[in-house]
Amino acid sequence: MDKLIITGGARLDGELRISGAKNAALPILAATLLSHAPVRIGNVPHLHDITTTMELLGRMGVDLTVDEKMNIQVDSSTINSFVAPYELVRTMRASILVLGPLLARFGEAHVSLPGGCAIGSRPVDIHINGLIQMGADINLEGGFIHAKAKRLKGCRLVLEQITVTGTENLLMAAVLAEGTTIMENAAKEPEVTDLAHFLNKMGAKIIGIGTDGLTSEGVEKLGETTVHYDILPDRIETGTYLCAAAITGGRVKLKDTRPDLLDAVLAKLVEAGAEITTGEDWIELNMHGKRPKAVSIRTLPYPAFPTDMQAQFCAMNAIAEGVGVVTETVFENRFMHVNELQRMGAEIRLESNTAICTGVNKLTGAPVMATDLRASASLVIAALVAEGDTIVDRIYHIDRGYDHIEEKLSQLGATIRRVPK
Ligand code: UD1
């Protein structure tokens, strides 16, 4: 397994281009299954999760072509299998996103149950119950969700809990259902919004986009002509590089991003002492050499502070001035990074779903283990200021969600290299 070796101490300074959002690209690639004509998707990030999704679609017989700029053309007319196998779903839970589109368009889907996950049990009951309410016949057997439906029927769905991929799955099912589907307590993350805009571009009739009340009037067919759609920028990649610069007391200008998607994160960075300036598609952060101040955060669904930025703020709080209280309300067991940060000298106390971080004057490099995607990012961020070398193992987690992280950080002046196994 590849490792990253990071030598701490460099103050980051420079400019970067932000990639397309992983969490928008995944549902949008799944949604191409709904289109009759080939679809072209642009601004796709270069990530392992994207390769896994392409492999998943490819195994179903879908025809995919990729150019050197990561524009992906998808033609689902050649599909010959409706199975999402365990070995792919196991590595990427978001594979569950093919369930809704397969069922809506082809009347059949066999998707492996994702099973446990490092950041909590993460069930998919809301996805399944919603589809049953729309008339699907669902059996759970042999670790698989076997779903069948002649044509799904629109209905009123009140989601028991806000779920991002659950909302996306049900929305993709609803666009081809007979009649109107009204979804309440829907997730309104920007990635859900991006998917809804893409579905409308293919001919869906969704209103209420960007709110927690989505209404879809079902249509018979989607994608009569070839559609081209560019994925929105990755707000979590953006936030991660802002934290990376902030922890080093540095400066960074991020281009091809959207500051309006990061209000809660930018507010916390300002509270931490950062000077932030923004334009329509760029953000600049400047710490003017100062050490960050500890900030308290509470993760919640969008537009509040995102759970996917929690670990990076724990890393920043670890060397900040003062005490920051970090409360995780979206996932159980999402503090795997805390143990590793402690091994680097952080003073963090865990009390159920709260991490109380008392900033220390210095962290020291150590061998650490990446446990999930965002936890890994927090270790890399901490390593940037740690004294000496930090070796981050199991970085396949990072490659799932960060496009060329070592190149981008090197571009900002970090000392980081990848060591192949
Ligand atoms: C998505 C994101 C992930 C992000 C998360 C929360 C993708 C591919 N991943 O994950 O990066 O951290 O949103 O913003 O977009 N739940 C249930 N039953 C369900 C579904 C969810 O109880 O059927 C619970 C989960 O256990 C969790 C909460 O709902 O506690 C939110 O999870 P959810 O929004 O579904 O996360 P994902 O869509 O898996």
Image: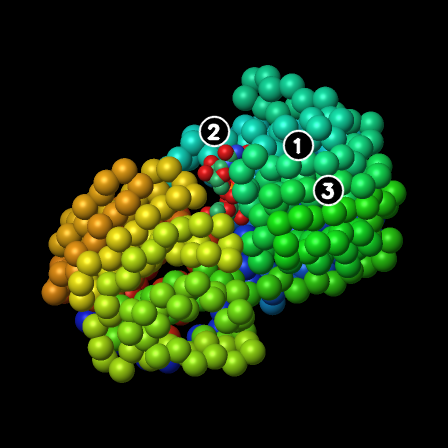
Residue 351 located left or right of residue 183: left
Dot label at residue 11: none
Residue 93 located left or right of residue 108: left
Q: How many marks?
A: 3
Task: Give the SS element for disc 3.
Answer: strand
Q: Mark 3 to mark 1: distance in Å?
A: 11 Å
Label 1 CB sits under 8 Å from any ligand 1 atom: no
Q: Which residue is disc 2 drawn over?
A: 115
Dot label at residue 182: 3
Which three-letter amino acid code belongs to the residue tagged 2?
Gly
Q: Marks 2 and 3: in contact by CB < 8 Å?
A: no
Task: Return the disc, 3 or 2, that comes first in the chain's sequence.
Answer: 2
Q: Is residue 45 above or below residue 62?
A: below
Q: Is residue 129 above or below residue 161?
A: above
Residue 327 located left or right of residue 135: left
Rendering coords of residue 99 (x, y %): 66, 35
Q: Which residue is disc 1 drawn over?
A: 130
Rendering coords of residue 333 (x, y %): 34, 38
Neighbourhood count class around disc 2 (C-alpha, 10 Å): few under 14, some 14–19, many 20 upward = some
Neighbourhood count class around disc 3 (C-alpha, 10 Å): few under 14, some 14–19, many 20 upward = many
Query: What residue lies at 87% left-to-right and 53% top-to-bottom?
Result: 224
